[in-house]
Image: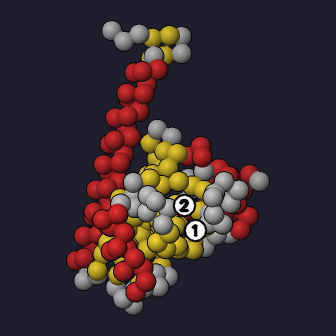
């Protein structure tokens, strides 16, 4: 029988339950990304699907560079493919598909270049509690960025987004409260 306290299950049991939730949420995120990729490919588009090894919401005062926004760390084996597509296209259209579980936001950001019929899909997740400073800046600026880099911090490319609400759960509600 699991130990409980007045507050409910013990910490180890809660962490184990959260780990299962997070693993399932990440699995669903990757499945969604693969389904989106398949839709683009069925329409004849070139695609690159990257599951970021790490995604972090970085506010201007927290970063080591002047870049702020969502920083996606991509595996080295996908970096070359990303750079080729990024440098060949303009990617003026984007969309964000997101879900939440256990205090994390899971998202698939889709960057599209309709003229070249190329789509870059990046799956990532971040802890909601670390996103508030970035959300505040994004609301003030009316924009947010996505940056792609390798583990060694080599910057591979950046995208500007004019609708930051797509990235933050509850963005519109909090904006109305301010």
Q: Residue at x 25, y 76 (%)?
A: 41
Q: Quadrant of the N terminus?
A: top left
Where residue 74 sits, quadrant-wise, is: bottom left
Q: Which residue is mark 2?
A: 70
Q: Quadrant of the C terminus?
A: bottom right
Label 1 SS: strand
Q: Which residue is mark 1?
A: 145
- Count of labels shown? 2
Q: x, y (%) of residue 154? A: 48, 66
Q: Is residue 41 above or below residue 17?
A: below
Q: Residue at x 59, y 43 (%)?
A: 129
Q: Is residue 53 visible?
A: yes
Q: x, y (%) of residue 170? A: 60, 52
Q: CA distance from mark 1 to mark 2?
A: 6 Å
Q: Is residue 173 left or right of residue 85?
A: right
Q: Residue at x 36, y 76 (%)?
A: 119
- Seen from the viewer's position, the closer of residues 47 and 99 is 47
Q: x, y (%) of residue 114? A: 40, 86
Q: Residue at x 46, y 59 (%)?
A: 152
Q: How busy is the neighbourhood of tag 2: few (under 14 within 10 Å), some, or many (20 plus)? A: many
Tell which residue pokes out farthest to the bottom in this image. Answer: 115
- Seen from the viewer's position, the closer of residues 101 and 129 is 129
Q: Is residue 25 above or below residue 158?
A: above
Label 2 SS: strand
- Seen from the viewer's position, the closer of residues 23 and 71 is 71
Q: How busy is the neighbourhood of tag 1: few (under 14 within 10 Å), some, or many (20 plus)? A: some
Q: Earlier in the sequence, mark 1 or mark 2?
A: 2
Q: Is residue 108 visible?
A: no
- Seen from the viewer's position, the closer of residues 116 and 74 is 74
């Amino acid at each position: 029988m699991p130990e409980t306290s007045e507050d409910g299950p013990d910490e180890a049991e809660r962490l184990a339950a959260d780990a299962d939730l997070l693993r399932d949420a990440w699995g669903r995120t990757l499945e969604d990304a693969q389904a989106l990729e398949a839709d683009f490919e069925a329409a004849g588009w070139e695609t690159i699907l990257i599951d970021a090894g790490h995604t972090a919401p970085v506010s201007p005062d927290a970063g080591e560079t002047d870049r702020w926004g969502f920083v996606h760390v991509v595996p080295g084996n996908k970096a070359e493919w990303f750079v080729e597509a990024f440098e060949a296209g303009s990617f003026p259209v984007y969309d964000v598909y997101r879900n939440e579980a256990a205090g994390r936001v899971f998202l698939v950001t889709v960057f599209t270049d309709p003229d070249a019929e190329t789509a870059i899909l990046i799956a990532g997740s971040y802890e909601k509690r670390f996103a508030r400073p970035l959300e505040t800046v994004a609301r003030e600026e009316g924009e947010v960025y996505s940056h792609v880099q390798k583990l060694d911090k080599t910057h591979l490319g950046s995208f500007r987004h004019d609708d930051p609400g797509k990235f933050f759960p509850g963005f519109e509600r909090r904006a109305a409260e301010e």
